[in-house]
Amino acid sequence: MRIIQDENYAALSCRTAEIILAAVREKPDCVLGLATGSTPIGAYDCLAEAYREGRATFRHVRTVNLDEYAGLGADDPQSYRYFMEKHLFSRINVQRENTHIPNGLAENPALECRRYDALCEALGGIDLQLLGIGKNGHIGFNEPARALDVHTHTVTLAESTRLANSRNFKSLDDVPRSALTLGMGGIMRAKRILLLASGEQKREALQKAVSGKVDPEVPASFLQLHPDVTVICDFDLNCAEL
Ligand code: GLP
């Protein structure tokens, strides 16, 4: 693992965007694994700016998002499809048909999960996967558990995750209880991974992820087994082992 501790959120965002832009320049039709949450918003702003300034084109890029809330559709401002449109897709020239997010309204979620795994495979796998980290160590919506799922699956959200994410909803009751998420296999098969963490409240989770035991109760700790992970944080990680 390569660990970069940046000065602040702006630097983290800019560095993240530059890494993504370099990947797109090197392989114009690369497959980007994208994440939602507050953490990547700054990087998405930098990508939009690069496009606006004519420094980048996303015409041939394909994207696959990590997860989506069950029961929320593209028109719902709380859905991750809506989030991606707002923060990135509507601001760059990615082709809509090349953007993929699990369908939270699928009548048969199990089938939708299988479709999503098949799609990732058909795209040739993820070249660069962007990840945030939950305070409980989750990645995507792979929540701490006694065992982790390999494939895309429906997950019951941890109450701590619902509480953390309730800041974007009118009330805690409005936060969906389940979501569809890429499994650990889908994430670990990405050729390269960028794990972002912003704010001191993520320090403990990140410390466990990078230097704790590989433990399904800290899903991000499995990233220690991946051959090409870059961690970018904007605080002093303060890990004795590093
Ligand atoms: C959410 C998302 C994750 C995200 C994480 C952290 O629940 N499913 O993909 O990385 O929680 O979110 P934030 O960046 O807002 O702290």
Image (cartoon, rainbow, N blue to C red):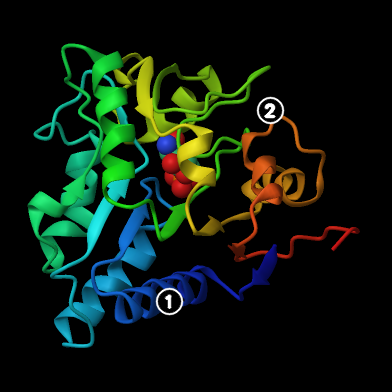
Q: CA distance from mark 2 to mark 1?
A: 31 Å
Q: Position of residue 126 (x, y in %)?
A: 39, 54
Residue type at tag 2: Pro
**Disc 1, SS:** helix
How far across and how far down the image is residue 3, in percent? 68, 67
Reading the image, the residue beneath label 1 is: 14
Q: Earlier in the sequence, mark 2 or mark 1?
A: 1
Residue 231 vs 81, above or below: the answer is below
User: Which residue sits at x=50%, y=68%?
Assistant: 9
Location of residue 95 by image quarter: bottom left
Residue 30 shows up from this direction: yes
Residue mark closest to the camera, 2 vs 1: 2
Q: Quadrant of the C terminus?
A: bottom right
Point out residue 119 in the picture as x, y percentages from the top left corner: 26, 39
Q: Which mark is residue 193?
A: none
The 10 Å Cα crowd at callout 1, few under 14, some 14 to 19, many 20 or more, is: some
Relative to 222, residue 149 above or below: above
Residue at the spot x=31%, y=75% of the render? Answer: 27
Residue 161, above or below 36: above
Count residues near mark 2 (Cα–Cα under 10 Å), then give few for <14, some for 14-19, many for 20+. some
The quarter of the rendering in which ligand 1 is drawn is top left
In the rendering, at what x and y percent does residue 159 appear?
A: 52, 17
Which amino acid is tagged 1? Cys
Residue at image position (29%, 34%) is: 118
Q: Which residue is mark 2?
A: 216
Report the front residue among 148 and 125: 125
- Does 158 sit left or right of 94 as displayed? right
Q: Is residue 134 left or right of residue 51?
A: right
Is 130 situated left or right of 44 in this image? right
Q: Quadrant of residue 231?
A: bottom right
Cβ atoms at labels 2 and 1 below 8 Å apart? no
User: Considering the image in quadrants, where does the N terminus appear?
Assistant: bottom right
